[in-house]
Amino acid sequence: MEPYRFGDITAFVAAVKTGSFTAAATSLGLTRSAVGKSIVRLEAQLDVRLLNRTTRKLSLTDEGAVVYDRWRQILDDLEDVDATMALRRSRPTGTLKLMTPPSFGQRHILPVINAYLKQWPELRAELWFTDRFVDLVEEGFDIAVRIGAPKDDSLILTRTVAWQQFIVCASPDYLARRGMPQTPQDLADHDTIVYLNAERPRAWRLQTSNGPYIYEGPGRMNIDSSEAMRESALAGFGLAHLANYIVGDDLRAGTLVEVLRAYRPPPDPIRLTYPSKRHLTPRTRAFIDLLVERWEAGAPWESEPTADS
């Protein structure tokens, strides 16, 4: 099959959009005759009539409507590529407004922001450390870090950049005094440090061969701060159920030891989310590119002991 001439397709789409050969010719910098010849060539190649022509207006035939929708989309996609590449060539400007969960953000996003601002001295950053769920479009955020499965939202794009794994851990001192739990049921015989979420204890979700096992306490100590829970666990107070991004360094150092590893629940995605504008702003693209580059070999908390506790 003879390939289509790109110029002929452009002329046809322009004629339909503008409503006349003359207007299409003006928009493309061609003559009216050249636009007409392009459309005649397309009709001959397809062996169908694409346009109904009268002295006053143009209208699409049924066949013309089909190919117009396809070709218009192709041209739009090509324009989108050009615009995207132009944006990527642009230097980032303005203020990056970013929202992230507090502990995760302070530990793992702030170092990336510091490197980002050093790389682009003309940029500014506005960071919000909060667990509050915000409407990115309504509140004007460029990007948000969210943990967990995405919600259906056509206005938001999302990219998974790492994984959160909840683990049960304790200090070697505590385990030497109280022993190592072997099954989730053993938790009832231990001191536990439980996270308070909106004044309600957050359940520990473990996975067994019979399905999920839910431990709901009561905890001997209930705390509304993951960082404080970690400090209590390091002090030998009891068992804590914490995300690996909080205790990764402690596991590597041996100051905390994972228990019940065989009962780990499935991990949760850690995602960058941003409004689904036609093109990402250069400042947003620059941050995403830098974070992905820094975490390409693995997120900073993911290297940990492999021996089963």
Image (cartoon, rainbow, N blue to C red):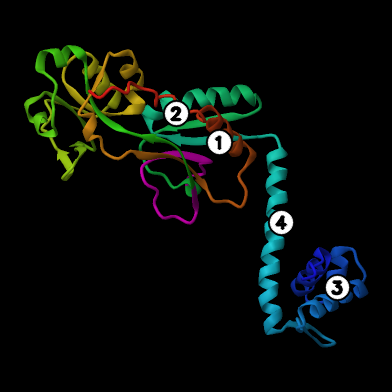
Please name the residue that numbered disc 4 is placed on: 78
Q: Are marks 4 and 3 in contact (CB under 8 Å)?
A: no
Which of the 4 image quarters holds residue 106?
top left
Q: Which mark is residue 288?
A: 1
Please tell me which residue lies in front, 98 or 65: 65
Q: Are marks 1 and 4 in contact (CB under 8 Å)?
A: no
Sooner in the amino-acid sequence: mark 4 or mark 3? 3
Q: Residues within 10 Å of mark 4 (few under 14, many from 20)?
A: few
Task: Say which residue appears at 22% left-offset and 32% top-offset.
Answer: 262
Cα distance between the residues tagged 2 and 3: 54 Å
Task: Say what secondary structure mark 1 lies in.
Answer: helix
Task: Say which residue appears at 84% left-offset and 76% top-offset.
Answer: 41
- Is 143 part of what is drawn in magenta? yes
Sooner in the amino-acid sequence: mark 2 or mark 1? 1
Residue type highlighted by circle 3: Ser
The boundaries of the magenta stretch are 139-157
Please name the residue that numbered disc 3 is placed on: 38
Sooner in the amino-acid sequence: mark 4 or mark 2? 4
Q: Position of residue 250 (x, y in %)?
A: 32, 17
Residue 52 position (above or below residue 245): below
Sooner in the amino-acid sequence: mark 1 or mark 4? 4
Sooner in the amino-acid sequence: mark 1 or mark 3? 3
- Is 166 part of what is drawn in magenta? no
Please tell me which residue lies in front, 161 or 136: 161
Please name the residue that numbered disc 2 is placed on: 299
